[in-house]
Image (cartoon, rainbow, N blue to C red):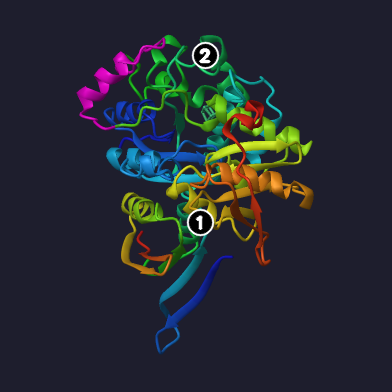
Amino acid sequence: MGATDAGRCDADGVACMSAHELDARRMLCPMPVIKAQNEVKTLEKGDTLAVICTDPGALHDIPAWARINGHQVIETEQVDDELIITILVGE
Amino acid sequence: MAIKKHKAIALISGGLDSLLAVRVLQEQGIEVEGINFYTGFCVEGHTHAIRNKDKDKEKRNNALWSAEQLGIKLHIVDIIEEYKDVLLNPKHGYGQNINPCLDCKTFMVSKAVEWIHENRKDGFDFIITGEVMGQRPMSQRKEVMPIVAEESGADDLLLRPLCAKNLAPTKPEREGWVDRERLFGFSGRSRKPQMALAAEYGFEDYASPAGGCCFLTDKSYSDKLVDLWDSRGSREYELDDIMLLKVGRHIRPKPEFKLIVSRDAGEGQFLTGYRNQYTTIESVSHNGPLVLVDGKMEAADMPLAAAIVARYGQGREAEKVEIAITSPKAEPSNIWVQPMRVDAMPMEWHV
Ligand code: SF4
């Protein structure tokens, strides 16, 4: 389990933003929040992290966590029983 | 010359006291960030919301909610593994149930000390908690408060804004980082002073856990945990074990296994998530609960388990009920049983 890196770079090779993914399926809150928090610590401002989880509690907790810590939830998607919550990393 | 703004890390449980403790210091211009420790036993919005009857309660994490009210950052730290030693070997023993409150408090404050060192660049100067003297029988008696400060290694960098005036001045007070006069001297079990202060600050809708901040203070939960340890002959546990103790009816017809019977659709759905790890039993011919088997159930025990499961379904009055028993990754084996009569089930099977 962990984040997969699917970084995108500018033509000159300078990283401009990278998209990451975190598997938090079957974890109960607050574990998806804790995993997301720890992953975000390793990322840069402007990166995104898509957290894939199954506990609906995350729909409330991840945005609350993002708000208070200066990040932004930019997309929330539900695919079957899975939720994909995408965070844009802030400061 | 600019005056250095002092910074504190606050232990946030999600209850009223830590909410107030932070606000008291914010009023004095102290910058605060919160830290919340997740032991796996925490009483927390979503676990309550598993049951249907609690579905309309707001599903929120109280620590995150508190931080948002206060406008502070919150760091949530997973201490599930390290906490096992605190729970299994508490130096100061247990409270009324298997709550090792004094060791737990000390451990959490020591983790906050560690946090300050690890995040030295962020310049935290001291630690605060929402403790109120004499509020909890075990961890907040006057004579034990210095124990937490000393054994955690926080010493006089541990400030309790709500009861500071009952204790010797700490370094933040002596150095004038905070004004001791504007701290409080709350003591005793009455919640009135805190409620008055909450009203003054305009806090509403805060969480007010009755027993404590975790399931270990709950008798029925503690009994289930002790039963689990006894039946396994070992006190080891995993996160799934302690989560499952929070849901369902637990029935132990034999020392080797117990049945976890969902009480409503919400719990049934929750237990469904464990199908690939546990053997499940459910009624096929009638509606009924989803049941998880925890432990070792022999083939000879299946009719007994099936009869119990049938007793909790709509076929309880029927002559025969068809029951499916499914092991992970196997096809179900179906049997017909006569549901166990309600009065035939010994009370001591209920954990
Ligand atoms: S109630 Fe639980 S979390 Fe709170 S101090 Fe006691 S053991 Fe620790």
Q: Quadrant of the C terminus of chain B?
A: top right
Label 1, residues with CA under 10 Å away: few <14, some 14-19, many ≥20: many
Q: Chain of mark 1?
A: A
Q: Is residue B239 visible?
A: no
B250 lies above or below B178 = below
Q: Is residue A69 visible?
A: yes
**In front: mark 2 or mark 1?**
2
Label 2, residues with CA under 10 Å away: few <14, some 14-19, many ≥20: few
Which residue is painted at 70% across and 48% down in the image?
Answer: B303
Residue type, mark 2 in image: Pro
The residue indicated by pointer 1 is A35
From the viewer's side, name the closer residue of B60 and B12.
Answer: B60
B268 lies above or below B212 = below
Q: Chain of mark 2?
A: B
Across and down, in percent, residue B114 comes to: 57, 39
Magenta segment? B182-205
Which residue is painted at 78% across and 49% down in the image?
Answer: B300
Q: Quadrant of the rendered structure where residue A72 is?
A: bottom left
Q: Is residue B45 left or right of residue A38?
A: left
Q: Is B196 a magenta residue?
A: yes
Across and down, in percent, residue B313 comes to: 51, 46
Q: CA distance from mark 2 to mark 1?
A: 35 Å
Q: Is residue B330 left or right of residue A55?
A: right
Across and down, in percent, residue A89 comes to: 38, 63
Across and down, in percent, residue B108 comes to: 55, 33
B282 lies above or below B130 = below
From the viewer's side, name the closer residue of B156 and B152.
Answer: B152
Q: Secondary structure at mark 1?
A: helix
Q: Quadrant of the rendered structure where residue B277 is?
A: bottom right
Q: Is B351 a magenta residue?
A: no
Q: Are marks 2 and 1 in contact (CB under 8 Å)?
A: no
The residue indicated by pointer 2 is B137
